Image (tube, rainbow, N blue to C red):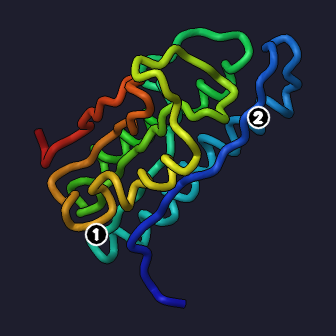
Amino acid sequence: RFGRIDLLVNNVGDFIRKPLEDFTPEEWRAMFDSNLNTAFYCSKYAIEFMRKQKSGVIINLGCACAEHVKANTTTTAYYAAKTGVLLLTKALALQEGPHGIRVNAVSPGILSNSVVKHPVPLGRLGLPEDRARHAPHRRLPVAGNRGATGTHAGQIEQGGVDGRTTSATDRGR
């Protein structure tokens, strides 16, 4: 209807927590379909429009600690899919940067309502309201012109748990 796509936010994904031995093949596929495959297909078709207009932004939502994930028998499928989302983000950032398309990932930290719990250096887990305040379009300059210097895969800090932002590309460097 409008003829262009300026921004795509891939913010979807199921989370099933249970031992690997209890996963059905359908549940395993569903984890990858809803987390990784959805990001791939939506990005693929949005890129067709973005390349024609020589601009666009794709923001993928990762998960807490996906860059440094440790083996866990009850969250393996989820973390495998989300780690794939971060790798997809970096690959698309390198591939699409020359076409004027920025591809970013934001990995929100652990919240008080999260199923996975980790020790928190600052003594307080984030709240769901914190995530809303730190949404990509508000916290990181990834969607607007202020973020036009590169593409990033990063993590929003929640309670001091690994709040680093790492750069996938920075204008070819």
Which residue does the numbered mark 2 point to in the structure image?
29
Residue 84 in sight here: no
Q: Is residue 65 left or right of residue 148?
A: right
Q: Is residue 4 above or below residue 69?
A: below
> Residue drawn 64% across and 23% down?
116
Question: Dot 1: what SS?
Answer: loop
Q: Residue at x 58, y 46 (%)?
A: 128
Q: Amino acid at mark 1?
A: Ser
Q: Position of residue 56 (x, y in %)?
A: 33, 67
User: What residue lies at 34% left-to-right and 39% top-to-bottom?
Assistant: 153
Residue 24 picture location, percent across and down: 88, 25
Where residue 108 is drawn, which disc sits there?
none
Q: Earlier in the sequence, mark 2 or mark 1?
A: 2
Res. 57 visible in picture: yes
Q: Is residue 6 left or right of residue 79?
A: left
- Tag of residue 55: 1
Where the C terminus falls, by quadrant?
top left
For mark 2, does the 10 Å Cα neighbourhood hold few (<14), some (14 to 19), or many (20 or more) residues? some
Local secondary structure at mark 2 = helix
Task: Identify the amino acid type marked 2.
Answer: Arg
Q: Residue 1 location, x and y as percent?
A: 55, 90
Q: On screen, 47 above or below 124?
A: below
Q: Residue at x 50, y 48 (%)?
A: 131
The answer to whether residue 98 is left or right of residue 88 is: left
